[in-house]
Amino acid sequence: MTTRKPDDTSLPTRDQLLAFIADNPGRVGKREIARAFGVTGSHRRAELNQLLRDLKKEGQIGRSAGRCLELTGDLPSETMVEVIELDDEGNAIAEPVIWQGDRPAPQIALVPHTGRKPLPAPGLGERAIVQIRHLPNGTYQGRVRRLLDTDSQQVVGIYKQTPTGGRIQSTDRKQAHDYRAEVPSGLELDDGDLVLAEPMSTRRFGPVPARVVRRLGTWDDTDTISLIAIATHGIPIRFPDGAMEEARAAEPVTEPGKRTDLRQIPLITIDGADARDFDDAVFAEPTSEHGAAWHAIVAIADVAHYVRPGGDLDRSAYRRGNSVYFPDRVVPMLPERLSNDLCSLRPNEDRACMAVHLWISDDGILNRWRFVRGLMRSAARLTYDQVEAHHQRQPCETSERVPEGQIEHLYGVYGSLLSARVERGALDIDRPERQVAFGDDGRISEISLRERHHSHKLIEELMIAANVAAARQLEENRMPVMYRIHDQPTPEKAEGLREYVTSLGLSLRKTPQLRPGDFAQVLKRAAETEHKDAVNEAVLRTQSQALYSPENIGHFGLGLETYAHFTSPIRRYADILVHRALIRSLRLGAGALPEDAATGFDKTGVHITATERRAMKAERSAMDRYMAGYMADRLGQTMTGRIVGTGRFGVFVRIHTIEADGLLPARRLPGGPFRVNDRTQSLEGDGVAYRLGDSVTVKLVEADAVAATVGFDLVEGGVESKRQRAPTGRPKKSSQYKKHKRKRKR
């Protein structure tokens, strides 16, 4: 707190007073202000008091609970906040839970508690009481005083009874120790129960106590695997009451009104057989308009009609960021009243939509587009398998109801779009997708690889074309865009890949500015060799992660200069923002993007990127546990796989038939000790090497669904290496060394 010289008797200006109070919220009164500005004497103090009274009458300042002065609409010295995002360095950014100011709620950068008992940082969506500090640059900092949500401190684990009492085995493989279970009276637990517990502070030696909060189920129930992922990664599963009330109050759109009536156009949905929501429908026909060969329509559920900016549904969707998909369930971004009903483009039901007309040339160039807000009626709900079979002249009853030629026209426009994709050199890295099948008893009956057809790629290319049109339309109208961006690989990763493919007799162009086509060429050449899978894996690991941002750098993987997500607003918040921007840009009615929304796009991009990655981790961890549980019934079996990763700890092996990954530890490999050769991406030992992509035969010796681990022993594999074991014993001293020693003694 700065103090003015005593001989300076002039009063502070109104702006100086407001700035001083803002810098010291809830910590200063009239006396502190007078002292800080050197105001002395009864006459001068009276003038200062009058100036403060005027500011209070104008509503610009008020008193805090402690009777100190603070700006009206500003943050109190201590307040409750909720973490809304994590920045690039993982630091929590929060907003006040209660905010009554006219301007948008301020963002607060959280700093850790510095007391004798450090508190863990609150996670995404969690709440805390923080002490507010107003920084000179106008931003806020909050020091965590108390956590209100305890998810970040909770443990998901398996309860087991031991001679010394109950224990909880954490499902987190990073937590090697068990907890001593403190079970509330009235709660009965059996061995194998999955529980949620809170660790307790203790000064005693031995296992850390953890109070059981609730029983989640039994370990042998397959649905508990998803519950573990949901609890471990902090996925919100309950919708706020306000969001549910808004969803229940929503009504279907039954009349076109100012919308374009698309109900006579035979739009169809094409999804997986197990799809739970249908947010896109497609149509195509030949044309000569606008110099095009094809006229296509992509119609998307009009989620923005129901999820209005600033409402409870909007806040809930923002917090979730996206839907999360598990083999046995979906944690939707929107309540089921919307995601599975009013916004789902079910056959023969009128649905509100945002649609884009696309005029595409024979070589796949997007010549023209036009967005409309419409009312549509899906002509059929088809699966990828049904569409592919129809194209192969094996129609089913459902596909035969589609107007003649419609499916063939979709394949026609796909052929044109595919030509453009190849011309751009877009990456095409196919990773087989695993699917889990459950028996009548609810247990896993089979894990298999989902077959990928041209029908999948057909929908992908139409969605990409619609996404490009959305981004370009918003750019033309100078509107804010939430881009989907993908940076080129870092020079270090590119050089690592170059060294690896060179060791295989392949090449990657050496240039400071790589293009996606350079990687596509490597993949094309590798496809004709035994190294196809290894190179595919290496190229994939070289790529950067895609993210959301209002700053455009293009999409490297797709070879596109501008790209945004428009086609899945039921499951992605980014798409809702793009819909709102289009509504505002084209004056298409209610639900438009607010005028000041762009000011928060930076933080929104970081947040929804974080929630997307959270979902990916949760989905992957659940699949790893399903896989380990499935493999547990096959202990002792011999399997064939390929090496997909190397490190000092050993090599990761992927089983061909089901894409199951497991560790082959270095200690179980002959030829040690080993070193990692980064250039060839291999683990090299005494005369033997284990290289990325090599085929190996292994025996399954470990499968732990709790820890999500699979372990192998080597049966056959490894290639000859020139590296030999270093000789043991102390090396002999040379005669030159001995002569040098004699000279020193003299």
Image (cartoon, rainbow, N blue to C red):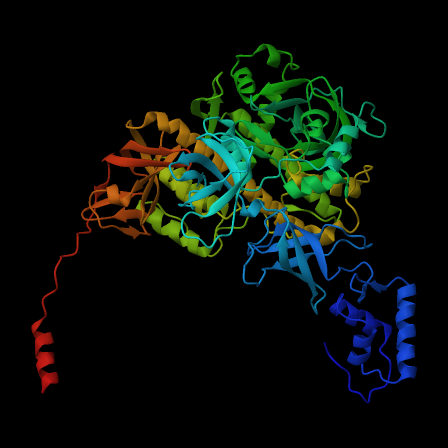
The reply to whether residue 510 is in sight is: no
Classify 18 as above or below 111.
Answer: below
Where is residue 732 drawn, in percent x and y? 9, 66
Q: Which of 175 and 427 is in front in this view?
A: 175
Relative to 582, does residue 203 appear above or below in the rendering?
A: below
- Count of number-bearing discs: 0
Q: Which quadrant of the rendered structure holds the C terminus?
A: bottom left
Is 476 drawn above or below residue 708 in the view shown? below
Q: Position of residue 311 (x, y in %)?
A: 77, 41
Would you say 387 lies left or right of 686 here?
right
Q: Which residue is drawn at 10% across and 84% down?
A: 745
**Residue in the picture at 92% in, 83% down:** 43
Q: Is residue 388 left or right of residue 717?
A: right
State which quadrant residue 265 falls in: top right
Where is residue 465, by image quadrant? Answer: top right
Q: Residue furthest bottom?
A: 7
Up-down relation of residue 259 to residue 319 (above or below): above
Q: Residue furthest front?
A: 185
